[in-house]
Amino acid sequence: MSEEKIIVIDFGGQYNQLVARRVRECNVYCEIVSYKTPISKIMAQSPRGLILTGGPSSCYEEGAASCEKALFECGIPVLGLCYGAQLMQHVLGGKVERAAMREYGHTELSVDTLSPLFKDVPQETECFMSHFDHITALAEGFKTIAHTKNCPFAAVADDDRKLYGLQFHPEVLHTPYGKTMIKNFVRNICDTKGTWEMGAFVERTINSLRERIGEKKVLLALSGGVDSSVLAALLSRAVGKQLTCVFVDHGLLRKNEGDEVEAVFGPSGSFDLNFIRVDAKERFLRDLSGVTEPEQKRKIIGRDFIEVFEEEAKKIGTVDFFAQGTIYPDVVESGLGGESAVIKSHHNVGGLPDHVDFKELIEPLRNLFKDEVREVGRKLSIPEELVSRQPFPGPGLSVRIMGEVTEEKVRIVQDCDFIFRDEIRKAVEALEERPSWMPDQYFAALTNMRSVGVMGDERTYDNAIALRAVITSDFMTAESAEIPYEVLHTVMNRIINEVRGVNRVFYDLTSKPPGTIEME
């Protein structure tokens, strides 16, 4: 591990791990600590700089997450983001109050290009705002280096002490030059060389797994997706045949995917591991019968997953470790690791239930984003077609079916999704290079809406399908993909003509935020 390190101090905001992701993109190692961590413990790690994250509170309220004034007197650069910027001013003698007008979303930003924080940033740009408080008076030594129409202190600086504050979120993709701002702080203001890279994570993780597991056995929930596949490769490198991969075919996979997973990871595949396929379709459909509430569906599937793994573990004997391909978007959307609100639960987040017979849980990818996981996969020489596979939720098609899950609805979604993916593939293959509209995740979902239609000379009253396609690099923020109309039109025609039970097709334009990537 490089000696260069940036510490991110977590005040409970939604994008805290994304801040760390942006620092790592600068090839500088980064760790997150709670705001409750003593300053002495933080400084013992010899960080080159500190970043204070956003948070859900008002810094002037009693009991709000806070920090000591001494944090800004340690002699190293500090960057406060949103709540972190407000807290910096509050602690150092400035003033923070409730704003007369809340700012949320894309906002025009004017910056002082002479500031080292805004090197290579245009004077007029955009930022992503999300705040109801704002700074109304600066602490001694600070000056304004950026403003918006409604926020006179959008960015502030004390260059002598290398203290900086941004009222907006540079870490999200909605701030076009946000990465540049963070890089300016990390590489220039903190004076780092950028020697850390993902290969260091791979070797460190493999060595850590070997030391932790020893001669014991591991059971992995293998779905065939990117996360679990990369985890399987890591564990295979670390402990070989001590790993047993259980693939639960819950009947909620994409069309033909169960057989494809077995072809890659089964006995005839190229991976040296123990592979077990469990056909649990009837069990999952039975337990989901009559259930319409999204969170309840997720919890049922999570419970059934655990029970199936328990049953398989008993068949293969003593299993000391249970491995899961949890990644950070799963964690943050489940409301863990801070004060974030629960957006949706994930079956692979939250630890093991009390009744599970495994001694320990292994989640080595827990602090990585999807693009980082793919990079790990490439470092491990996993075939590109597997590394590049688009994400698929653990609860499968159940979260792409609004309302009750039935065998008939699963068939409809599988067929529509197959057509959508097939037409995207054909459209991309017809081009010489990857188009700008190529989505990172795309799928069909069955709405709970039925509508009147006409097919031939007959009236129909059938289902409406929603197509979802987004462009994203980190899966924390996303924009809808601008797929050419002719491609969408072809998809619509094929679905209406080839899939029994569908007479209407929509395209979802919602970004994330405010929506999520999945439909439920």
Image (tube, rainbow, N blue to C red):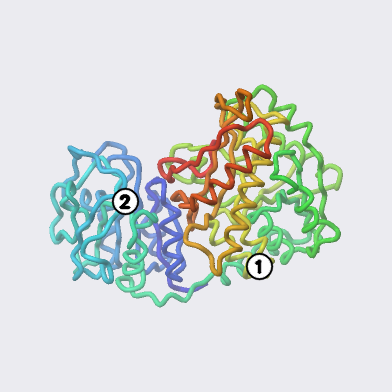
Cα–Cα span, label 1 and label 2 = 40 Å
**Residue 59, horizontal then vertical, whole percent:** 27, 43
Q: Secondary structure at mark 1?
A: helix
- State which quadrant residue 399 falls in: top right
Which percent across, then down, holds residue 199?
Answer: 58, 72
Q: Label 2 sits on what residue type? A: Phe
- Judge from the rendering whether residue 504 lies leftward or rightward of residue 233; answer left or right: left
* Amino acid type, mark 1: Asn
Dot 1, how many residues are within 10 Å of its Cα: few (below 14), some (14-19), or many (20+)? Answer: some
Above or below for 438 versus 119: above
Mark toward the viewer: 1 or 2: 2
In which quarter of the view is residue 142 placed? Answer: bottom left
Residue density around tag 2, few if under 14, some if 14–19, many if 20 or more, within 10 Å: many
Above or below residue 512? Residue 368 is: below
Question: Which residue is pictured at 75% across the width and 47% down the height?
Answer: 256
Residue denoted by label 1: 207
SS at badge 2: strand
Does residue 325 appear left or right of residue 73 in this picture?
right
Nearest to the observer: residue 511 or residue 161 = 511
Q: Earlier in the sequence, mark 1 or mark 2?
A: 2
Give coordinates of residue 38: x percent, y percent.
Answer: 38, 54
Query: Residue pushed farthest front?
Result: 457
Q: Judge left or right: residue 7 versus residue 217.
A: left
Residue at the spot of label 2: 128
